[in-house]
Image: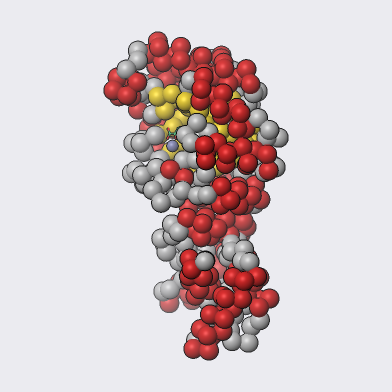
Amino acid sequence: MADDHRIRIFDTTLRDGEQSPGASMTLAEKLEMARALAELGVDVLEAGFPIASVGDFEAVRAIATQIAGPTICGLARCNDRDIDRAWEAVQLAQKPRIHVFLATSAIHREHKLRMTPQQIIDRAVAGVRRAAGYCADVEFSPEDAARTEIDFLCAVVEAAIDAGATTVNIPDTVGYATPTQFSRVIRTLKERVPNIEKAIISVHCHDDLGLAVANSLAGVEAGARQVECTINGIGERAGNAALEEIVMALRTRRDYYGADTGVKTERLYPTSRLLTTITGLAVQRNKAIVGRNAFAHESGIHQDGMLKERSTYEIMRPEEVGVPKTDLVLGKHSGRHALRDRAIALGFHLTEEQLNAVFDDFKALADKKKEVYDEDLAVLIEKQLGDD
Ligand code: KIV
Ligand code: ZN
């Protein structure tokens, strides 16, 4: 099962991503984001942590009932209340999943949970069994797996699969791993856990050392077939692995990884823009794939090379990731229709009233400036949305 060439994309923008300071979203915003993620073609959408609050529960339930396409997943700690609540929230989804987690590293066992290794195994088994009683699709995460003693990690993973876990997710919870070390963990699990073929191995990496994407890809090389990630890499502290980077690394280097995702890559940029608009968390200009400079060529030598043959300095086409073509420049003669189309391409869905207001600002700017670029337009729209 685990050796196929399809990498499942598990999006956790609405759960781990929302845990970033400043990224909380209203129910309506989560639904809008969930719709965009379904359109993007993610395989699994982690909609939230239902026990965390009534708001989180309502958001997960709304997404489970209204969003078709991806598997809809709710997070739960390994206890009955969490698991029951997660099931209550996701049960109406076309494809529901319960994701249970329990920390396994010595640091977490001793200081946070105060539990022995055997108690951890027993709790994990009980949690997975309870979830499997509700739902055929159960994911288990040994939190802080990357810092867990490998023999113990193998024992927990084996027990979780025996108890009914269909996906085992290996988190680098604190972003401590390095690529070679992390791939060794995945390889060892594949070699030593006797029932590992019954489950999909997943990876979930944080970016504290700026290695989340590299570690996730190292996991894929070692046999992981699900990657957990977020749009723009938002998430706890320094964030999670950035979805757009994982997807485009696998697509652009299919020759090397021999695997690909089902993501519609041309939706990457609009989805990234939508998240930025909703949360107000901008991506840095030089951010790979979706940053403003990701496809900009400044130096004369590079521009010359590009004009002769694009592949000299371009490994992906901007259109592949949905960056709107810039050969159609908006100016003072452009109409409302062109403005709306460009706004949609940039990931903004404006009401009639908002469009009218942006149009007035756009005309005023176009009178002063010969050409209005996407960047200018985004600023006008963001200002307008902020004023609303
Ligand atoms: O980082 C982590 O360990 C998590 C788990 C809940 C999977 O987010
Ligand atoms: Zn996480």
Q: Residue at x 50, y 73 (%)?
A: 380
Q: Residue at x 56, y 84 (%)?
A: 363
| Ligand 2 positioned in quadrant | top left
Q: Position of residue 23 (x, y in %)?
A: 44, 50
Q: Is residue 115 left or right of residue 249?
A: left
Q: Position of residue 42 (x, y in %)?
A: 61, 44
Q: Is residue 84 above or below residue 32?
A: above
Q: Is residue 156 above or below residue 349?
A: above
Q: Is residue 180 above or below residue 108?
A: below
- Is residue 378 visible from the viewing direction of this image? no
Q: Is residue 76 above or below residue 290?
A: above
Q: Is residue 173 left or right of residue 139?
A: left
Is 275 or 257 nearer to us in this picture?
275
Q: Is residue 197 left or right of residue 279?
A: right
Q: Quadrant of the N terminus?
A: top right
Farthest residue to the bottom: give it: 367
